[in-house]
Image (cartoon, coloured by chain):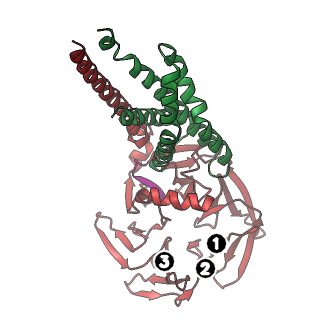
Amino acid sequence: MLYVLSFLLSWLSGMLTILITAFFSYDQFSMVDIVSFATLTFAGFLILFFLVYLILLKVANNKITGSNQFIYFPIIFALPANLPVYFLIWKNMGELYGSSEATLFALGFLTSGLVFGLFWAWKNKMPGRAKRV
Amino acid sequence: MKKLLVISYWLLVSSISEGHPGIGIVKDSKGNIYYTDLAKVWKISLDGAKTALVSGVHTHELYMDKHDNLYGEHLWYNGESKNTWGHYVWCLKNNGELVKETNPTEGFLNNYSFARDSLGNMYWVERFTTSKIMKKTKNGEIIKLAEGKFGFIGWLTCTKNGSLYFTENNKLHKLSPDGKSGSYQMETLAGNIGSKSTDFSMMGRNYDSYGIWTDAAENVYVAMINSKKVIRIGADGNPQTILTSNSMWTVCSGIFDNNGNMWVLENSVSNEVRPRKITREELAASTTAGSFTTKPHFLITIVTMTGIVLLFSGAKMVLNKREQKLLHFSI
């Protein structure tokens, strides 16, 4: 359940970043744009989630403990975990979309990674009361 | 690869895909409005009554001559096995008789146009690497008016006196007779009328501007199909937004009736067509304020924010329940 929630929360946060940035970047951000960004980021993040995030989360949970998680989890998921996506965005820029769309994609995935890392750091901190008892 | 992306993209967003909308909206001498919805041609009488005049005709353009004869075409696809197109030109005479102006022919209209001046001269664009703007006089003589390596040239509009307006990418040009030697002079009225749009919105085309029309004072109006607005180009060349469509509709073309009201032809995301009347009073007081909230962008941003709050609350609830279970177990 928490995996599904963390996935949706991270993806939606990425989408929100795209939507808010678009207010300042474009004169008009139509339904076609919104559906395109939503579909492509959802599909991309779904693949990334299963292939990279879950594996990395398992490793990071074992290696990083305590408050350090609040620093390292967001960094890990926003940067190294997203590297394949950043590479693909950069590689296809110009051919499939322009630089402004590439920036929006990168910002979206960066936010998704940050939120995912923070969510799991926060989740690991939450059941502290029970542990103390 | 690009083709693959375009195909998959269109499959994904097929429910909101846009076709190639028409620009045909004309008026007769009495002030009745006629428009095409790409399947029928409709008439809106002065009392507001709407009637279908010509059925089963796929025409993007219309032309009304000074005798109130209405012209249009019928364009059809012969199926994938043949992969050819066919067309003919029809005319609805002022006595109500519908006749074929040209015989059904394979291909697209050639050396024929619905952009005409009051003398009946036709004007059209031949779009190639080197594009040409052509004129066919009433006696059938074909003259080249302009030639050059233009960018994408959109719809051509002709005023009664033979001035031509057209967009080349995001520039608006005017080609007008100099009145002496019979030659034409081209001037650029506006250098940048395009809006900043994403590659997704612009996929498959490289323009934003669509139908062009003028008012009695020869102010130029351009329908911006992507940014869902109508702009008026002033004498200084600066575009001024005078009308915006809501999220589901976009303006494709327009015309002024005899009373100075503006009629715009709007196309929906599901390819429905409707005319909309903007009275001269509304036009005079036109303001684009408030259009922001009609955009789906704003609403979806709010919905996304709400979704995030709900998901976060859901996660907190799940974790609290788990903690309570752990507490209960520990105690």
- Judging depth in this view, the residue of B258 and B176 nearest the camera is B176
Tag 2, which secondary structure?
A: loop
Amino acid type, residue under disc 3 in the picture? Gly
Q: Position of residue A1 (x, y in %)?
A: 33, 35
- What segment carries the magenta color? B245-252
Amino acid type, residue under disc 1 in the picture? Trp
Answer above or below: position of A92 versus B310: below
- Judging depth in this view, the residue of B24 and B328 nearest the camera is B328
Q: Are marks 1 and 2 in contact (CB under 8 Å)?
A: yes
Q: Which residue is mark 2?
A: B112
Q: Which residue is mark 1?
A: B124
Residue B293 in view (yes/no):
no
The chain to which mark 2 is attached is: B
Amino acid type, residue under disc 2 in the picture? Tyr
**Residue at the spot 74% in from the left edge and 74% down from the top edge:** B144
Which mark is first along the chain, 2 or 1? 2
Q: Position of residue B113 (x, y in %)?
A: 59, 76
Chain appearing in red on the rendered image? B
Q: Which residue is mark 3?
A: B72
Q: Which quadrant is the N terminus of chain B positioned in?
A: bottom right
Does the segment drawn in magenta span residue B246?
A: yes
Answer above or below: position of B94 versus B182: below
Tag 3, which secondary structure?
A: strand
